[in-house]
Image (spheres, rainbow, N blue to C red):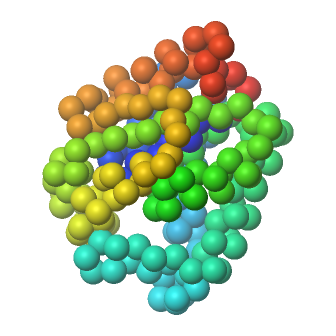
Amino acid sequence: MIVLNGGSSAGKSELARKLQAVLPQPWLTFGVDSLIEAMPPSMQTSDDGIEFAPDGGVSVGAEFRALEAAWMEGIAAMARAGARIVIDDVFLGGAASQQRWRSALAGLDVLWVAVRCDAAVAARREAARADRVRGMAAAQAELVHRGVVYDLEVDTTRAEPAACAQTIADHLRRPGEPGRSTRA
């Protein structure tokens, strides 16, 4: 299991696709964006759901957390059944977000990867994409890493996604390193 954490527009989704290309066995990718897209539209207009403020701030409510917990448990069940999985997430709560994943993934071999990107570069990427709320990338660039413990860090500010993917793949091949198992 590989968990990629980074702010909006840091390049996690592209990195996850590149990982699928360089890892020797098939790996599935799941991202928090697909979880949000799977929720009914009413979840984005309710205090209990997820709300995106015009300044890029994000707030989540109890119903979102409940669905997120079920999603995490489902991902963990697939990993326990033998699927190799890459998660693309944004730890808005920093260490608390990582703890939610740690609880769901208890007993699994997990490689925790920081996907860093300079806030100004992420903001430029965000501005080039029509599907992003302006200000989110800059607000999340450091926030998502607060208190999070990683096995590996990559920086997409200047490094291409393929090079970052290769760094992660090489790390998985090292004996004795966290996340080195190709099973999950």
Instruction: State whether residue 182 is above or below residue 86.
Output: above
Q: Nearer the viewer, residue 183 or 63?
A: 63
Residue 131 falls left or right of residue 149: left
Q: How many marks?
A: 0
The residue sitting at the front extreme is 147
Identity of the residue drawn at 28% across and 29% down: 160
Identity of the residue drawn at 77% across and 43% down: 106
Q: Nearer the viewer, residue 74 or 41?
A: 74
**Can residue 20 be seen at all in this image of the molecule?**
no
Q: Quadrant of the C terminus?
A: top right
The residue sitting at the top extreme is 175
Identity of the residue drawn at 43% across and 27% down: 165
Residue 181 falls left or right of residue 117: right
The residue sitting at the right extreme is 81
Quadrant of the rendered image containing residue 29: top right
Q: Residue 66: horizontal and vertical position, in percent?
A: 69, 73
**Can residue 103 be seen at all in this image of the molecule?**
yes
Q: Nearer the viewer, residue 53 or 17?
A: 53
Q: Residue 28: horizontal and vertical position, in percent?
A: 62, 40
Q: Residue 178: horizontal and vertical position, in percent?
A: 63, 25
Instruction: State whether residue 169 is above or below residue 37.
Output: above
Q: Residue 144: horizontal and vertical position, in percent?
A: 42, 54
Instruction: State whether residue 154 is above or below residue 128.
Output: above
Quadrant of the rendered image containing residue 42: bottom right
Q: Quadrant of the N terminus?
A: top right
Quadrant of the rendered image containing residue 143: bottom left
Residue 99 falls left or right of residue 158: right
